[in-house]
Structures are given as structure tokens and as C-alpha cells.
Image (cartoon, helix red, strand yellow):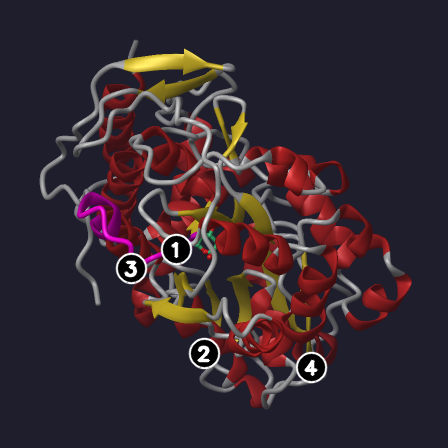
């Protein structure tokens, strides 16, 4: 399922006017039917009865059992789980279609953290009553992803930070003391590991390089991990720089020299996870969810995670995650609010952590000794989330990500040089964020 909205086939992006809000530049050019005012009226959240919960495909197998628990306790307010494709862009497209037709088929939406501004500005989701959620106990950057113009439009459900998965057994056998902190070290480690007979046929590294949201994440991480930025502290594009080029060149050069195998240019999260689990990769960039699944696979006990490597020092992750919002066109909003409260509670998110290694929004869970015993990387992940770099918080996020994907992909596939791709991207992004 690869149909996508906002995918431009030329370099033209559709952004125009902008508003500067809270230091971030926010595009105000509504693309399709929304008022763009962002001033949604207070919702009364009335009505009880059956609702739906709409999210990307649950690759962890833990969501339906949690919904079943809710359904047993609330037989008159049952939740039906609607699973969308795993591809973030495809999820966004289906949710937007539902909103544009003002359909009541979707009640509670699991929104990627990067869609909050767009959905709130178009009034596709309701502003939530803040006091319903223990936001002060949650990690601050995570709460920020759920806000638009100071209002809370979604409840933080899970966070995400990119991590470097690596094969502890192979590194040890090759005489390597610990995970690499730089890209050069990672390449050198691979060269050593690949000399081992048990590493025959293995490739070095993969992330998510298919042309979809994952590429925006991996491109941004490469740029940030080389000391560059996609947008500066004021939200202005600043990607046509030597530092950003170093970042993009890491990805482009790695595809060229085989560090990243050719097929990895088609990988989303699940493809890379499967390649790593089946022993095809020494290193993998992925989100925390892959940790618990790998523990049930053939490589159980032979892998660990570390911070992402960078150019001269450890790199930085993009801030990922999902928040739960109420569709403006839904019925039974009192039930929806209760269900969101249940799904985003400390207890439920702790269960998602224990059973599926999903990164919780609650700060204290990262410091819990029992949880750290199960997931030793939790303190590192907490720091990685606290220092993660958010993707641009813009209403026209679809156009921004589309431009990034197009230019990064052109460089990866050799259609453009890195320098040209960054120059073109800078121009495209300026259209989305010019004053
Ligand atoms: C994960 C992240 C999300 C990101 C997506 C990209 O689901 O939580 O923020 O956009 O991956 O594929």
C-alpha cells in the first residue's frame, strides 16, 4: 500500500504563507478544506457507546489484548481496533481522507508526533482537557509533541528514539570491546566482523531508507549526527551546509561502498528488523519496539543497543512516537476520552513497555530498577529522547517530509549529488517556511 498524499513528483512544494508561533515557523496555507485557524471550540466530549481506535498495524501483538481488557470492563462502550498499514505516510493519508469526508468511522486516532499541528490546524481533532492527563509526570519533549498553539490536542501514548542495534556475539568474537560511537568506527568494526566465518554473507548496516517518513527520520538523524540541522532553532531551513552534506554523504557513501546493502534502500522498520533477526546485518538503526521482538527471535541473547553513532561523536536521534487524539467527526466522545485515559495511563504504558518494549511517556518508568533489569538501555533511551531532535512542527508537514524524501532519495539513488540535493531541498523548504 504505497499511495501517498502530498507526494510531489516535481520539486514544487505547495507551501506559501507562514505564521511564527512560539519560535517555530508554522505554515498557514491550508491545503485541503481546513480552516487553518487552529482555534477549535471547546468540545464537550459527550456520548457513550461503541467507538473505534485507529492506528498503524500492531507489529507487537499487544494492542488487541489491551483493548480486550477495556472491552471486558466496558461491555457497552466496546472499542473496535482498525489497523492501518505500517507505513506512516499511508496511515496519514487514510486518516486525512476520513477527516476530509467528515466520516465518523474513526474515533480515536493514533497520531504520529509529527502530525499534531496539521491535524489540529485543520480542526480534524478536538482540543483535549489538559487536566485529564498527568502531563507533569511525562517527559517534557514528549508532551510538546502533543501541543499546538499552547493547547493539548492529543495525549502522549508512546515515545520513540532511534537506537543502534548490534550483535554482541560477533563484536566480541572479532575482539571489539564495545559498540561504535562514530560512523568510521562502525565501518571498521564491520570490516573486522566480516572476516569471521560466522559472518559469511552478512552486511554491515541498515536503517529505513525507503521513500517514506522513515527516510525523513534517517536523513535528519544523519544530518544532525554530523553537526548539521534541517531547520535551525527558529524553524528556518538550514540544510544547505557542509555539516548537512557530511551527514547525507554518510548515507550515500555507505550505499555506494556496500556498508548499507543495496536492498536496504527499500527497507522500512519491519524489513530491517527481519534482516537483523535473521542474521543478515551486524548493525541496525531501529526504534525500541524491535528489542522485545528480537528477544523472541533466533538472535535472542546475542544483541544489544547503544546510542546512534555520528560523525565525530555519538549521534542524535529524531524524536518519534505516537499520541492519541479524538477525531472531530466522531460520536461517543465521552467514551473516547475515557479510553484514551486508559491507554495512556502509567499502568498501561508500563505494560506496553514490559511486553513490547515501547518507550513510555512517563519519566519515572525509565528509572525503575526492575524495568532496567529487563531493558538495560532505558536510562540511555531516556537521555536520547530528552535530547532528540524534533522534526519540523509545521501545519504543512506533508509537504516538508515529501521534499525531504524526494531529495534524500535522489541522492541515495545517484540521480543527484548530495550537494545538489541539499541545495534543492533548502529551496523547497524555504517555500514552506518563508515569511
Ligand atoms: C515510528 C516513529 C514515528 C516515525 C515513524 C517513521 O513509528 O514513532 O514518529 O514517524 O517511525 O517510520
As helix, strand or loop, the secondary structure at mark 3 comes to loop
Instruction: Give the alpha-carbon distance from disc 3 to disc 2, as whole Å.
Output: 36 Å
Q: Position of residue 222 (x, y in %)?
A: 47, 44
Q: Residue furthest left?
A: 10
Q: Which residues are magenta?
A: 97-110
As helix, strand or loop, the secondary structure at mark 2 comes to helix
Q: Which one is in front, 166 or 160?
A: 160
Instruction: Give the alpha-carbon distance from disc 4 to disc 1, as whole Å.
Output: 42 Å
Sequence-wise first label, 3 or 4:
3
**Residue linked to disc 1:** 107
Instruction: Give the alpha-carbon distance from disc 2 to disc 1, as whole Å.
Output: 35 Å
Task: Relative to 127, say whether 28 is above or below.
Answer: above
Establish whether ligand 1 lies closer than 8 Å to the Cβ of label 4: no
Q: Position of residue 190 (x, y in %)?
A: 56, 68
Contact (CB < 8 A) between labels 3 and 4? Answer: no
Categorize mark 1 by other alpha carbons within 10 Å: few (<14), some (14-19), many (20+): many
Q: Is residue 49 left or right of residue 179?
A: left
Instruction: State the mark number for residue 275.
Output: 2
Instruction: Give the alpha-carbon distance from disc 1 to disc 3, as whole Å.
Output: 7 Å
Contact (CB < 8 A) between labels 3 and 2? Answer: no
Residue at the spot x=37%, y=47% of the render? 327
Q: Which one is in front, 1 or 276?
A: 1
**Residue linked to disc 4:** 302
Q: Position of residue 227 (x, y in %)?
A: 55, 31
Q: Is residue 430 left or right of residue 320?
A: left
Categorize mark 4 by other alpha carbons within 10 Å: few (<14), some (14-19), many (20+): some
Task: Relative to 94, say whether 175 is above or below.
Answer: below
Q: Is residue 267 visible?
A: yes
Instruction: Give the alpha-carbon distance from disc 3 to disc 4, as whole Å.
Output: 44 Å
Sequence-wise first label, 2 or 1:
1
Amino acid at each position: 500500500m504505497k499511495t501517498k498524499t502530498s507526494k510531489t513528483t516535481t520539486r514544487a512544494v505547495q507551501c506559501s504563507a507562514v505564521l511564527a508561533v512560539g519560535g517555530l515557523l508554522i505554515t498557514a496555507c491550508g491545503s485541503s478544506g481546513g480552516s487553518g485557524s487552529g482555534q477549535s471550540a471547546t468540545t464537550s466530549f459527550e456520548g457513550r457507546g461503541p467507538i473505534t481506535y485507529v492506528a498503524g498495524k500492531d507489529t507487537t501483538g499487544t494492542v488487541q489484548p489491551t483493548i480486550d481488557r477495556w472491552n471486558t470492563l466496558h461491555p457497552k462502550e466496546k472499542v473496535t481496533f482498525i489497523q492501518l498499514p505500517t507505513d506512516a505516510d499511508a496511515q496519514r493519508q487514510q486518516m486525512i481522507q476520513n477527516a476530509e469526508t467528515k466520516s465518523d468511522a474513526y474515533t480515536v486516532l493514533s497520531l504520529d508526533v509529527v502530525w499534531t499541528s496539521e491535524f489540529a490546524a485543520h480542526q480534524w481533532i478536538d482540543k483535549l482537557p489538559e487536566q485529564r492527563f498527568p502531563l507533569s509526570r511525562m517527559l517534557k519533549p514528549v508532551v510538546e509533541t502533543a501541543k499546538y498553539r499552547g493547547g493539548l490536542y492529543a495525549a502522549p501514548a508512546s515515545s520513540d528514539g532511534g537506537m543502534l542495534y548490534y550483535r554482541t556475539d560477533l563484536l566480541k568474537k572479532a575482539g571489539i570491546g564495545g559498540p561504535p560511537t562514530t560512523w568510521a568506527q562502525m565501518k571498521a568494526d564491520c570490516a573486522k566482523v566480516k572476516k569471521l566465518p560466522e559472518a559469511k554473507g552478512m552486511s554491515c548496516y541498515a536503517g529505513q531508507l525507503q521513500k517514506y517518513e522513515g527516510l525523513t527520520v534517517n536523513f535528519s538523524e544523519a544530518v544532525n549526527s554530523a553537526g548539521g540541522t534541517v531547520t535551525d532553532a527558529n524553524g528556518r531551513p538550514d540544510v544547505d551546509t557542509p555539516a548537512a552534506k557530511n551527514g547525507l554523504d554518510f548515507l550515500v557513501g555507505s550505499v555506494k561502498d556496500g556498508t548499507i546493502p543495496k536492498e536496504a534502500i527499500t527497507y522500512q522498520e519491519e524489513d530491517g528488523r527481519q534482516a537483523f533477526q535473521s542474521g543478515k546485518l551486524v548493525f541496525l538503526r531501529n526504534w525500541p519496539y524491535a528489542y522485545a521482538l528480537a528477544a523472541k527471535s533466533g538472535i535472542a541473547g546475542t544483541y544489544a543497543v547503544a546510542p546512534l553513532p555520528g560523525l565525530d561523536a555519538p549521534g542524535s536521534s529524531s524524536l518519534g512516537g505516537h499520541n492519541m487524539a479524538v477525531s472531530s467527526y466522531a460520536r461517543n466522545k465521552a467514551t473516547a476520552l475515557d479510553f484514551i485515559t486508559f491507554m495512556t495511563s502509567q499502568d498501561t504504558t508500563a505494560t506496553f513497555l514490559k511486553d513490547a518494549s515501547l518507550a513510555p511517556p512517563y519519566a519515572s518508568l525509565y528509572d525503575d530498577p526492575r524495568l532496567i533489569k529487563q531493558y538495560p538501555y532505558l536510562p540511555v533511551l531516556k537521555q536520547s529522547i530528552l535530547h532528540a531532535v524534533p522534526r519540523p512542527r509545521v501545519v504543512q508537514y506533508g509537504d516538508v517530509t515529501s521534499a525531504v524524501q524526494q531529495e534524500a532519495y535522489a541522492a541515495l539513488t545517484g540521480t543527484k549529488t548530495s550537494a545538489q540535493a541539499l541545495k534543492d531541498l533548502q529551496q523547497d523548504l524555504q517555500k514552506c517556511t518563508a515569511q
